[in-house]
Image (tube, rainbow, N blue to C red):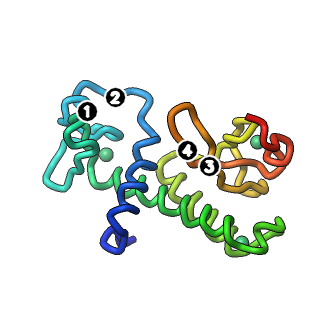
């Protein structure tokens, strides 16, 4: 996969970087804290390493981890952008384009050892065949990309 970083606007890069940084590892090792190892895989750093928060902390990522996480952020956004604007998805009816975008996103998650999880209500893993949609949910400090079983979304309504 080639990285379409060069076709992203600066604003897009900032937004996608924000998505990448939402998914922090459960534990940050002292090496990663000091910028000597990748935040996610602890690989030693080299010239292709990426500074994650210059001026804020020393955290860095190896290129492999960063691009894998960027791909996941981009495919989530592609899927979400589509469902917001597609007449079929808004019905809501089964949409082949949405299915394709979801499948692409699920592949990037699988590469990270992750899966879709329902952030709307039940918090359970969303199976590949389960009807689900990408959603933005409001956390305490920010909005986060998430997912919802279609059935959970219907039941949760607009309750906070
Ligand atoms: Zn890494
Ligand atoms: Zn659609
Ligand atoms: Zn659910």
User: For this view, does 36 lie left or right of residue 125?
Assistant: left
The earlier-in-sequence mark between 3 and 2 is 2
State if disc 1 and disc 4 touch (CB < 8 Å): no
The earlier-in-sequence mark between 1 and 3 is 1
- What's the distance in space between the residues labelled 3 and 2, CA to CA? 26 Å
User: For this view, does 143 lie left or right of residue 26?
Assistant: right
Give the image location of residue 5, x and y in percent.
33, 68
Of labels 3 and 2, the one closer to you: 3
- In-front residue for pair 159/60: 159
The residue to which callout 2 is attached is 28
- What's the distance in space between the residues labelled 1 and 2, CA to CA? 6 Å
Q: Does residue 145 lie above or below 71 as drawn?
A: above
Identity of the residue drawn at 19% across and 39% down = 55
* Quarter of the image with the C terminus in it: top right
The earlier-in-sequence mark between 4 and 3 is 3
State if disc 3 and disc 1 touch (CB < 8 Å): no
Ligand 3 is within 8 Å of the C-beta of the residue at disc 4: no
The residue to which callout 4 is attached is 144
The quarter holding residue 52 reads top left
Judged from the image, the secondary structure of the residue bearing numbered disc 3 is strand
The earlier-in-sequence mark between 2 and 4 is 2
- Rendering quadrant holding ligand 2: bottom right
Local packing at callout 4 (Cα closer than 10 Å; few below 14, some 14-19, many 20+) is some
Give the image location of residue 140, x and y in percent.
56, 31
Of labels 4 and 1, the one closer to you: 4
State if disc 4 and disc 2 touch (CB < 8 Å): no
Give the image location of residue 24, x and y in percent.
42, 36
The residue to which callout 3 is attached is 136
The residue to which callout 1 is attached is 32
Local packing at callout 3 (Cα closer than 10 Å; few below 14, some 14-19, many 20+) is some
Ligand 3 is within 8 Å of the C-beta of the residue at disc 3: no
């Amino acid at each position: 996969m080639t990285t379409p970083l060069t076709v992203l606007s600066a604003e897009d890069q900032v937004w996608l970087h924000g998505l990448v940084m939402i998914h922090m590892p459960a534990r940050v090792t002292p090496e990663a804290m000091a910028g000597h190892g990748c935040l996610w895989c602890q690989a030693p750093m080299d010239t292709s390493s990426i500074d994650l928060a210059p001026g804020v902390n020393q955290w860095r990522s190896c290129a492999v981890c960063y691009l894998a996480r960027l791909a996941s952020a981009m495919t989530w956004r592609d899927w979400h952008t589509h469902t917001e604007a597609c007449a079929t998805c808004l019905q809501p009816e089964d949409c082949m384009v949405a299915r394709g975008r979801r499948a692409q996103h699920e592949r990037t998650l699988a590469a990270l050892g992750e899966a879709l999880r329902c952030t709307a209500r039940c918090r359970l893993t969303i199976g590949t065949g389960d009807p689900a949609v990408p959603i933005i949910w409001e956390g305490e400090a920010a909005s986060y990309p998430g997912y919802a079983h279609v059935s959970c979304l219907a039941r949760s309504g607009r309750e906070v």
